[in-house]
Image: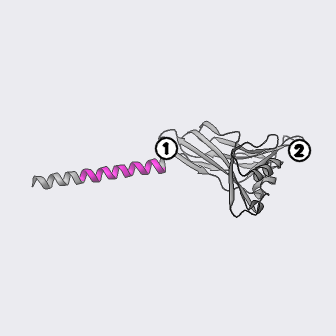
Amino acid sequence: MEILADIGLVALGALLGVGSSGAFWWLQSHYWVPKIEFSKEIAEYVLEQEQSFFQCAFENVGKRDIIDLSIQVRIGIKGYLGAKGWAYHTVSSNASRVPQLALSKKRRVRVFDTRETIEFLDAPSKSLRDAIEKCTSLRDVLQLGEDAAVRVHVFGYDAFSGARKHFKSCEYRKTDIRKGTFDGLKIVKNTRF
């Protein structure tokens, strides 16, 4: 009889252990994680002398601060010079590392700036790189192949749990670019110039 009681206690302990581990995993991966929402479009902020920069925005819509954010801007071009697939490359932006993003705060990420040369973090082929460097606008870059898109990737940690999560924006195409500036995550007319 004692052996049955011991087996029952071991089985109960195992069930409680598996159940509590599963509950902790669910909280860690579904509740104690950062949450980000991206803008639906890219804003072209027009400056003086026919200069501009292009940016997207995102907001911390979670329950806590997000810490140690890592941000990457990836550009993909399909079918450049008859190539069959996509050629992806990462470019530097004004916000590759952000130490903290408080609750309900927004961050703008510069995708392209006409005043600066593009800095590749993982360069594409020489012919594509040369073509991109000759472009004077993000619209020009997004017209190089049969199809092209920009996507922003954000990695961040929840300030409470330490859970890391990856977020990616929609694929922005040339039809998703609007002149203006951000008011929240929406683009409004640029009244400065």
Q: Residue at x 68, y 59 (%)?
A: 86
Magenta-highlighted stretch: main secondary structure? Answer: helix
How far across and down, in percent of the image, does residue 153 sit? 63, 48
Q: Residues under labels 1 and 2: Cα distance?
A: 44 Å
Magenta segment boundaries in residue numbering? 12-30
Kindly indicate the quadrant of the structure image that contains residue 7: bottom left
Mark 2 lies on a secondary structure that is loop
Amino acid carrying label 2: it is Glu
Report crowding for label 1: few under 14, some 14 to 19, many 20 or more residues within 10 A (C-alpha). Answer: some
Query: Secondary structure under badge 1?
Result: loop
- Relative to 35, 86 lies left or right: right
Where does residue 96 sit, x and y in percent of width and height? 65, 40
Identify the residue shown where x is 12% and y is 53%: 3
**Is residue 152 covered in magenta?**
no
Residue at image location 43% in from the left, 51% down from the top? 26
Q: 188 and 67: which one is in front?
A: 67
Q: Earlier in the sequence, mark 1 or mark 2?
A: 2
Residue pushed farthest front?
126
Residue nearer the viewer, 76 or 126: 126
Q: Is residue 63 above or below residue 150?
A: above
Amino acid, disc 1? Ala
- Position of the C terminus by quadrant: top right
Name the residue beneath numbered marker 2.
Answer: 50
Q: Residues within 10 Å of mark 2 (few under 14, many from 20)?
A: few
The residue wearing badge 1 is 163
Closer to us: 114 or 35: 114
